[in-house]
């Protein structure tokens, strides 16, 4: 009689080891090069103004070109990930944006640079959600949030690395050095992933034709496990189907969970770009020295890094609950930045706190949204959330610029951003009980299947292991 083996239960019982370290490490490198290329255009802008004689106002569309391309990346690579595999999609994405980033070395006009930025942005935006989906599918439930955020923190560090490279090498090697390094690095990481990155076991369990590959990955994850020839692999903690339909993103509780996650993503990224881009402008207009105003961006990112480290374990333990808390704290933090007459130390403290909240809540959203979708639509589900977040990232700079063009005081941008965060808080508050109910339902399925899986493993486990 054929035995059934539950892949989800096997994954959840594993201790964090070398296999998980490989998954997190390669994912971190992917996020590092992704974050580097995503922000790289900001570092070369001053030299483009000098060499190409372009006006500062013309840089706005250039900055938005890559972000706009990112709108199309998540659904495209999400589809590829759900159809052909997470590993395949991630590697294709890394090669894709690596090649088109490298091509920017030979851009000789604003138009050609914008076109290349847009195309590269498709890959940059597409790699993120698929990497998150793959991490989620290999992470034991008890550390799922931490594994996801450890990988994703590479995005922030990649952006910071671009500043270091530009300060050390751009004066002697020109702005092209940013794209030489930003193009070659993803190709190297893609090659590394090709050889060491595992395909998702949950994805492979839905593809009988790829059983041999599943057994190889399972042997890496649980070396002591022996599988009989007639063993049937199941995912009893999820409802999975052979084919995907877009309406599946709204089935059952997902009818509310999916759009609420979309809203939270849009608002968090919109406000993030509001604060990140306009704080130096605000401080400079208030009379702060230029170098001190620039320091605000560093404090913002450092606050975000601290925030991510602070919420990793709470997300694992309490799920989505830290997200509405962070939304609530960010409302006064962002609004008070715009108050005129505050001393410098108070403004810098508020900027640090705003970064702590805004970046950490983004990571909290990303770490939790991937857990509510079953395997067969996880890439598309997470990709749709990223796509809506990209809408916010594109709208933020454009709205801010339009308001300033109408002579709206910079301070008012922060009051508007604070008001938007109230809407984000409402969405997160409504989402939290729905999320907990969804996770509880999936956990109940897992518990019901666990006893059967233990018996199956005892039957198939090698003697002495």
Image (tube, grey):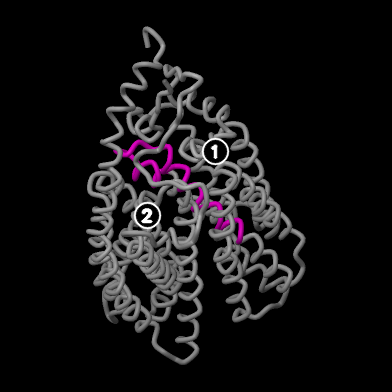
Residue under label 1 = 207
Highlighted range, magenta: 122-150
Q: Viewer-proximal residue, 1 or 254?
A: 1
Instruction: Name which quarter of the figure residue 322 lies in.
Output: bottom left
Instruction: Say the numbered circle drawn on residue 199.
Output: none
Residue under label 2 = 369
Q: Where is residue 355 shown, x and y percent of the image?
A: 35, 61
Image position of 430 (left or right of 205):
left
**Extreme-top residue of the structure:** 464
Q: Viewer-proximal residue, 11 or 232?
A: 232
Does 135 appear in magenta? Answer: yes
Which quarter of the figure is the C terminus placed in? top left
Which quarter of the figure is the N terminus placed in? top left
Q: Nearer the viewer, mark 2 or mark 1?
A: 1
CA gap between label 2 and label 1 equals 24 Å
Q: Viewer-proximal residue, 67 or 53?
A: 67
Image position of 446 (left or right of 210):
left
Above or below, comparing residue 389 to residue 412 in the picture: above
The residue at 51%/52% (across/down) is 128
Q: Where is residue 156 shown, x and y percent of the image?
A: 46, 53
Does 64 appear in magenta? Answer: no
Q: Residues within 10 Å of mark 2 (few under 14, many from 20)?
A: many
């Amino acid at each position: 009689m054929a035995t059934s083996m539950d892949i989800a239960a096997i994954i959840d019982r594993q201790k964090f080891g070398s296999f998980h370290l490989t998954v997190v490490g390669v994912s971190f490198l992917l996020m590092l090069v992704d974050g580097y290329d995503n922000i790289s255009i900001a570092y070369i802008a001053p030299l483009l103004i000098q060499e190409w004689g372009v006006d500062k106002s013309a840089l706005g569309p250039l900055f938005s070109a890559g972000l706009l391309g990112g709108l199309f990346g998540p659904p495209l690579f999400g589809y590829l990930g759900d159809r052909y595999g997470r590993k395949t999609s991630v590697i294709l994405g890394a090669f894709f944006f690596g090649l088109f980033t490298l091509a920017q070395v030979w851009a000789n006009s604003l138009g050609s640079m914008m076109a290349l930025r847009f195309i590269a942005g498709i890959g940059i935006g597409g790699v993120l959600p698929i990497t998150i989906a793959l991490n989620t599918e290999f992470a034991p439930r008890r550390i799922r949030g931490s594994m996801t955020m450890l990988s994703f923190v590479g995005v922030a560090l990649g952006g910071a690395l671009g500043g270091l490279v530009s300060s050390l090498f751009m004066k002697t090697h020109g702005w092209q050095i940013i794209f030489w390094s930003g193009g070659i690095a993803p190709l190297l990481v893609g090659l590394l992933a090709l050889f060491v990155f595992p395909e998702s076991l949950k994805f492979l369990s839905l593809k009988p034709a790829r059983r041999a590959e599943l057994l190889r990955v399972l042997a890496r994850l649980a070396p002591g496990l022996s599988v009989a020839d007639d063993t049937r692999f199941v995912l009893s903690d999820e409802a999975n189907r052979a084919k995907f339909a877009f309406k599946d993103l709204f089935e059952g509780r997902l009818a509310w969970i999916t759009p609420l996650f979309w809203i939270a993503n849009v608002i968090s990224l919109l406000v993030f770009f509001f604060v990140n881009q306009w704080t130096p402008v605000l401080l400079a207009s208030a009379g702060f020295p230029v170098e001190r105003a620039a320091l605000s961006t560093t404090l913002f990112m450092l606050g975000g890094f601290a925030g991510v480290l602070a919420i990793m374990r709470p997300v694992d333990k309490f799920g989505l609950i830290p997200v509405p808390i962070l939304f609530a704290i960010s409302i006064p933090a962002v609004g008070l930045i715009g108050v005129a007459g505050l001393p410098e130390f108070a403004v810098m403290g508020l900027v640090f706190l705003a970064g702590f909240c805004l970046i950490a809540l983004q990571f909290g959203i990303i770490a939790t949204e991937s857990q509510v979708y079953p395997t067969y639509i996880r890439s598309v589900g997470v990709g749709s959330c990223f796509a809506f977040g990209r809408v916010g990232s594109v709208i933020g700079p454009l709205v801010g610029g339009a308001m300033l063009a109408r002579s709206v005081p910079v301070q008012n941008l922060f009051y508007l951003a604070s008001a938007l965060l109230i809407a984000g808080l409402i969405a997160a508050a409504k989402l939290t009980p729905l999320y907990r109910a969804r996770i509880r339902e999936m956990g109940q399925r897992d518990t019901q299947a666990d006893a059967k899986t233990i018996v199956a493993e005892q039957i198939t486990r090698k003697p002495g292991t």
